[in-house]
C-alpha cells in the first residue's frame, strides 16, 4: 500500500507531526483564490504543499519578504516553434516560471504522425516543466498539399487514453465544422464531453453558434475586443495570445473584467528560439498584460488557476494545501521576474538559470524525415508558358499574402527572375512520400539580389520551401538541407553560406538553444549579405506554404488561391 | 451513425438552414459568462440551444421582455429529506426552476445499501430534474450504532463507473481523515483525481490542511465568515448552505466578492416536505442571497455556472450555443419567481405547476426495510438500577443536545417518567438486522403529557426512535410504524392517533407530496394535543440517534457521550 502510506505521511506532515521537507518563510503569497497577497509560510512535503504557517522542516528558505507566485501554465503552444527538443525547451522556460504547457504537436504530427507525437510525449516526461498534449485535429491540414502522415480516428483513439493527453487540439478546420463535413464531425463526436480547443478566426453569428454546438470550448484567435466579447458571451474560454508571431494583448486586454476574467487565459501559441533565449516565456506575457492595464493578480490567475480550471487539472495552478509545490519567488508582481523557481518542491532554477542538468537530448530516436532524393538544377528549370504571371506578395511580419500580376521575367524562353523588381522564384519540394512533386511560383518581398534560402519548416505540411534568384542556388540550398535531415539554409551558387540543421522531423534541432539562436543569426546575416531585407525571412518563408491563410500560397502541388480554396495556374 | 447525423442537424439549425424547434423571443437573457443582461432571441433544437438571434422555428414564444435564467443546480442535497420519491421531488422543484441536483444518498444507503442507491438512480432517470449522485462516503456512519448496510471499497468501485455518479460524497469522517485511518484513506485514494466533497465543521489550521491534502475539494459546513474565508483561501469551493434545517447565508454572504464569487455555490443540503410544497427550492435560496446583498447575477451564477464548473458538467448552467436548453422565464431577478420552466427545450411548468404528468411512483421495488418483529410492552420495561440518571436535553431547532443529571423517576422499582419536569422515556429499536437491540434513555424537551411519538427516520442509521410517557404508548407507536414499513407516528395507549407511512426504506413515502405534508400536519396536531410543544418534533427526534453531534445521544446500542465518542450508562 505505497499510495496509502504516502497520503498518510502527507497528513502527518500537514499536522506538523513529522517534519516537512521544505519551509518557505517570510514570503508574500499570491493567493489566486481570494486575490489577496497573504503573509505566511508555506510547507512542502513529498512535492506537495501541506500547509501554511509554522512547520518544522528539514530545510528552510527565507524569502525576505519576496512574493511567492504559483508556476505559470501556458494553455496553448506549439513547442515545435521553439525549434528545440522538450529538454531544451524546459531548460529555457523553467527559469522563467513556467511549470506546465499544453502543447498541440500539430507540426511534428504532420511530418511523422504517431511517431512524432510519441517522441514528444516520451522525451517530455519528468522534466521541470509538465508537458500535456492535445490530439492534433487537422493532420493533414488540407487536401491541397502532401503531408507526411495523417491522424485519423484510429490514431486518435490510441492517443486519447494516454496519460498527459487532455483532449482534441484546436479545430482549425472551422469551415469543415460549420459545413458539417462528416470526417470532421466524427472527430468532434469522438471527443464529445472532453476538452476540445477551438480556432475560429473572425467566425461570428450563426457560424460561431454552429461551431459551438459541436462542443468546442475555447478560442485563441481573437484579434479584436468585439470578436472576443461575442465569443465570451457565447461561453467560449478566451485564450489571449501573445506569442512571437501574433500579439493580441493590446487589442484584447479590455475584455478582461471582474466577471469575464475567470474565463480568460494568456497563451503564447508559439515562441521562437531567440525570444525564448533573450526574453522568456509566460513571464513576458504576464508583464505585457500588466502593462496593458490588467491587475497583476488577475494576470497571474490567467496563467495559473484559470487554465487549471479549463483543463480540469487537479492540484495545479495555486499555492494551497494539496497542490503540487510548483511556484517561484520574485521581488515584484507589477513586473514579474522569477528568481527562485521550485518544481514539485525542489529548487530547480535561480536568477534565470537552471541549477542542475535535466538530462541530455535523446538520440535514441530515428526521426529523420527526408524521404526525398537530392535534387537537380533541372528540376527548377521552368519554361515560359505565358507573358503574365501571378506573384505572391509578402508583408513584413504578416502571415497573409496578396496576389498581384506582373510580366513574366523570361530569358530565352526560360523563366528567370527580376531582382530589380524583387520578383524571385519560389518552389515547394515534397519531402515525405517521394512523389517528386515540385510546385513552382513567384514571390515579391524577400529582396534577394542573388542566392537562395530554403527551409524544411513550412506550415502545415512542412515540405521544403525555397526562394531564390537562380536554379543553381536553389538547388544547393535544397540539397544542403536534405543532406542534414532538414533545416534552414542560405546558399549562393554552389556554396552553402549558413545552415541550421533540424534533423528531428526537419523541425527541431538536436543542439542546445544557444546554438540554434546563433545559427539563426548567421543565417539572417548571410541572407542580408545577399540583399535580403525581411527582418524574419525564415518565419515569412514558413507561412508561404500554408494554404488556409489568404490570398495566394504555394504547396508541392502548385499555386493555391486561398479565397477559392483551389489551385490556380502560374501563367495567365 | 445516429450521433453524427444529430450533430449535423444541430449545426444546420444553428446556421438557420433548418428550422429550430423553439424560438424564445423578446427576452432578457441572464448571461452568466459576462454578467450582462442581454436582449436577444434564443433558438433551441433537439433540446440544445443552437443560437442567439432570429431563427426560423416551429414554435415561437414571446416573453414580452421577461428575463430568461439558466436552470438552477443544487450542488448538495440529501433528497431523502423531502420524504418523497424522485418523481415527487421533481414535480415539486421543477416548477421552481431547479434543473439539476447533486444528491448524496447517504440516508437510504445506511438502510438498504446498494439496493437503496440503485433505487434512487433508477427512479430518478428521465425526469424534468437531472439527478446526479455522489457515492456515500460514511456508511455506516459510526461503530456506535447498527446500520442496515455498509458501503465499502467494492461497492464504491461498482458505483463509480456508473452514469450520473460524479465522485465521493461529503467526507463526514473528518477525524478519520485527519488521523489517517487506513479505511478512510483507502476511500479517498480510490477517488483521487475525482470530485470529493467535504464536510469539515470548524476544522481549521493544520487539521484543515491535513483534510485538504487528501484531495477534498468543497465544504458546506461553514457557519461563519472567518471559517469560510480560511477554507476559500486554501482552495476549497464553498457551498453556502441554506436548507430547511441549517441556514448559513446571513453569516456567509459577506465572503462572496468579485474574486471569490466564482468558487462559491448555494446549496440546500436538505429540504423538508412542507418547505418544498409551500416555498420552493433554490429559487428561495437565491432570493435569500439577494436579500443578503449578493448581486442577483452573482447569486444566479452560484447555482448555475459555478456548480457546473465544480462538478465538471459540460453544457449545463448557462444559456449559450451548445448548452442544454434548461432555463426559465421570470419577471424580476431581484426576487426570482420562475414562470415558464423549460427542460431540454420543452415547456414543463408554468406559474408554479408542472404541465404534464411525469410518470407515476414506481411500485416495482421491494424496499421494505423493517427487519424487526412486533415489539412487546415488556421490551420497554426498565428496572431502576440507581437513583440518578443522565438525561438528553433537546433544544428547539438545534441538532446538538446537552446532558444533565436528575433523579430517576422510579415507581415500585420500575422506571417511569416525570411529566411535570418533562423527563420522558426515549428508546431506539434496531430494525435492520433482527438483533433485538433496544437502547434506553431519558429525554427532556418534548413536553408530552401522555402518549408517544416514534420515527423510522433517525440519522444516520435510521433505526426506530421513540419518545413516550408509558410503555404501552411507546409500544403502540413502534408497532404501528413497523406495520406500515416505517414512518412517523403518534400514539396514546393502544391507539395510533396519526401516522405517515414511509414504506420505502422507512424513509420515503410512496404518496404525493401534498399527502405527506398533510399527514405531517396531522402528526404535529396530534403531538400538540398530547401536550407536545416543539415546533418540529419529528425533526428533533430524527437527530437524537446521531452519535456524531454533541453532547448526549442514543442509539440501539445505548447512550452515547459524543464528547468521548463512547457509550455511557444511563444510571449514575
Image: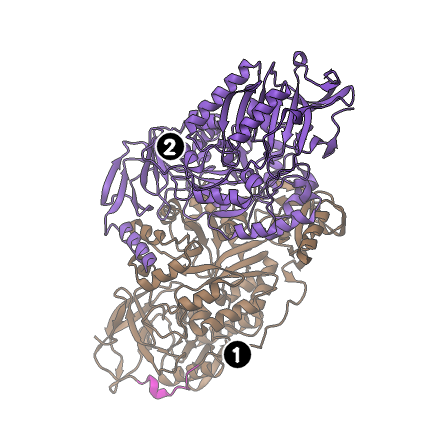
Chain colours: A brown, B purple
x, y (%) of residue B327? Answer: 36, 38
Between residues B418 and B101, which one lies in front from this camera angle?
B418
x, y (%) of residue B93? Answer: 41, 33
What span is colored magenta in the figure? A371-381
Disc 1 residue crowd, few under 14, some 14–19, many 20+, Cα 10 Å: few
Q: State the image quarter where residue A99 is shown.
A: bottom right
Q: Chain of mark 2?
A: B
Q: Is residue A389 visible?
A: yes
Q: State the image quarter where residue A53 is shown.
A: top right
Q: Which residue is mark 1?
A: A366
Q: How far apart in space, not on screen, are marks 1 and 2 (Cα)?
A: 64 Å
Q: Which residue is mark 2?
A: B95
State whether the magenta stretch is mostly helix, strand or loop.
loop
x, y (%) of residue A219? Answer: 41, 54
- Residue A375: within the magenta? yes
Residue shown at 41% from the left, 26% from the top? B514
Amino acid at each position: 500500500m505505497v499510495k496509502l502510506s504516502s497520503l498518510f505521511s502527507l497528513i502527518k506532515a500537514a499536522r506538523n507531526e513529522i517534519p516537512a521537507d521544505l519551509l518557505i518563510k517570510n514570503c508574500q503569497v499570491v493567493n489566486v483564490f481570494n486575490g489577496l497577497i497573504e503573509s505566511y509560510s508555506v510547507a512542502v512535503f513529498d512535492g506537495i504543499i501541506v500547509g501554511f504557517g509554522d512547520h518544522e522542516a528539514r530545510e528552510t528558505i527565507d524569502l525576505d519578504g519576496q512574493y511567492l507566485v504559483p508556476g505559470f501554465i501556458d494553455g496553448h503552444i506549439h513547442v515545435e516553434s521553439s525549434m528545440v527538443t522538450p529538454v531544451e525547451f524546459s531548460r529555457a522556460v523553467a527559469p522563467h516560471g513556467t511549470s506546465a504547457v499544453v502543447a498541440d504537436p500539430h507540426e511534428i504530427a504532420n511530418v511523422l504522425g504517431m511517431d512524432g507525437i510519441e517522441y514528444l510525449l516520451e522525451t517530455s516526461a519528468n522534466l521541470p516543466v509538465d508537458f500535456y498534449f492535445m490530439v492534433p485535429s487537422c493532420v493533414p491540414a488540407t487536401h491541397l498539399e502532401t503531408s507526411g502522415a495523417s491522424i485519423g480516428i484510429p490514431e486518435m483513439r490510441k492517443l486519447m487514453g494516454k496519460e498527459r493527453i487532455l483532449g482534441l487540439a484546436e479545430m482549425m478546420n472551422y469551415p469543415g465544422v460549420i459545413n458539417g463535413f462528416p470526417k470532421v464531425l466524427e472527430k468532434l463526436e469522438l471527443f464529445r464531453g472532453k476538452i476540445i480547443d477551438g480556432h475560429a478566426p473572425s467566425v461570428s453569428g450563426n457560424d460561431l453558434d454552429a461551431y459551438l454546438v459541436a462542443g468546442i470550448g475555447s478560442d485563441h484567435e481573437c484579434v479584436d475586443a468585439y470578436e472576443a466579447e461575442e465569443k465570451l458571451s457565447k461561453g467560449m474560454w478566451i485564450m489571449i495570445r501573445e506569442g512571437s508571431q501574433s500579439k493580441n494583448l493590446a487589442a484584447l486586454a479590455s475584455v478582461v473584467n471582474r466577471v469575464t476574467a475567470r474565463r480568460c487565459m494568456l497563451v503564447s501559441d508559439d515562441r521562437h528560439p531567440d525570444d525564448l533565449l533573450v526574453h522568456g516565456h509566460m513571464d513576458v506575457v504576464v508583464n505585457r498584460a500588466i502593462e496593458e492595464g490588467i491587475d497583476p493578480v488577475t494576470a497571474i490567475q490567467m496563467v495559473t488557476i484559470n487554465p487549471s480550471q479549463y483543463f480540469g487539472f487537479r492540484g495545479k495552478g495555486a499555492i494551497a494545501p494539496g497542490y503540487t509545490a510548483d511556484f517561484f519567488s520574485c521581488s515584484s508582481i507589477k513586473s514579474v521576474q522569477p528568481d527562485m523557481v521550485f518544481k514539485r518542491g525542489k529548487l530547480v532554477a535561480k536568477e534565470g538559470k537552471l541549477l542542475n542538468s535535466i538530462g541530455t537530448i535523446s538520440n535514441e530516436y530515428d526521426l529523420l524525415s527526408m524521404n526525398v532524393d537530392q535534387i537537380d538544377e533541372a528540376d527548377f528549370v521552368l519554361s515560359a508558358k505565358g507573358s503574365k504571371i501571378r506573384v505572391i506578395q509578402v508583408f513584413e511580419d504578416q502571415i497573409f499574402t496578396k496576389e498581384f500580376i506582373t510580366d513574366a521575367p523570361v530569358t530565352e524562353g526560360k523563366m528567370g527572375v527580376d531582382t530589380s523588381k524583387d520578383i524571385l522564384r519560389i518552389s515547394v519540394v515534397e519531402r515525405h512520400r517521394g512523389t517528386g512533386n515540385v510546385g513552382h511560383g513567384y514571390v515579391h518581398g524577400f529582396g534577394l539580389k542573388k542566392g537562395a534560402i530554403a527551409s524544411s519548416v513550412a506550415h502545415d505540411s512542412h515540405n521544403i520551401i525555397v526562394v531564390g534568384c537562380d536554379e543553381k542556388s536553389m538547388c544547393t540550398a535544397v540539397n544542403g538541407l536534405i543532406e542534414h535531415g532538414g533545416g534552414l539554409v542560405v546558399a549562393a551558387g554552389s556554396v552553402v553560406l549558413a545552415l541550421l540543421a533540424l534533423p528531428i522531423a526537419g523541425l527541431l534541432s538536436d543542439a542546445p538553444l544557444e546554438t540554434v539562436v546563433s545559427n539563426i543569426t548567421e543565417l539572417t546575416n548571410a541572407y542580408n549579405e545577399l540583399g535580403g531585407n525581411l527582418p524574419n525571412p525564415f518565419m515569412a518563408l514558413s507561412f508561404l506554404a500554408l494554404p488556409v491563410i489568404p490570398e495566394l500560397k504555394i504547396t508541392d502541388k502548385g499555386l493555391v488561391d486561398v479565397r477559392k480554396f483551389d489551385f490556380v495556374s502560374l501563367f495567365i
